[in-house]
Image (cartoon, rainbow, N blue to C red):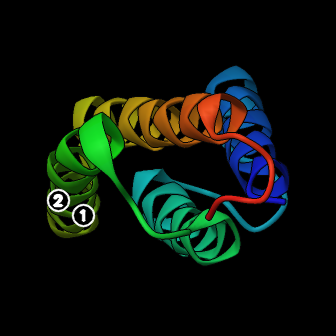
Amino acid sequence: MATVPVLFTIALYIEYLADGSTLWVHGPRAMAATALVLGLAACVLGSWVWTGAARWLSAPLGAAALLAAVFTLVTGSGVTLAVLIALVTALWVVSTVRHVRTPAGRP
């Protein structure tokens, strides 16, 4: 379920890079706000009890993503926006790998 908002975020970002605007996204701040909301939605949809390496990877990645989002909202920097999108994608990859490696029936 978490894949849908993450892929939508990536698609919006790619379209934003191509045109400079897409749908409601007309600048780095709007893209950062959208990525933050969709990233939080992915977190809610895909979160389980974190164990092992996933917990140690996800916590710093999530904190870094939040800081990148806030910094982008404040400054409007395209570089930190790219970092934010990369971090959201990395969080999704960690979560997906964890879900694939977890045996059926375990949280």
Query: Residue 38 placed where, x, y %?
Result: 63, 67
Query: Which image quadrant for residue 26?
Result: bottom right
Q: Amino acid at mark 2?
A: Ala
Query: Residue 45 placed where, x, y %?
Result: 70, 72
Query: Residue 14 placed where, x, y %?
Result: 70, 27
Query: Residue 48 placed where, x, y %?
Result: 55, 69
The residue closer to the viewer here, 91 or 12, is 91
C-alpha distance separating marks 2 and 1: 5 Å
Q: Which residue is mark 1?
A: 66
Q: Left or right: where does residue 35 sit relative to residue 52?
A: right
Describe the element under mark 1 as helix, strand or loop: helix
Residue at 52% x, 73% y is: 40
Q: Which residue is mark 2?
A: 63
* Number of marks drawn: 2
Q: Left or right: where does residue 72 sit relative to residue 54?
A: left
Q: Left or right: where does residue 99 sit relative to residue 49?
A: right
- Depicted 72 relative to depicted 37: above or below: above
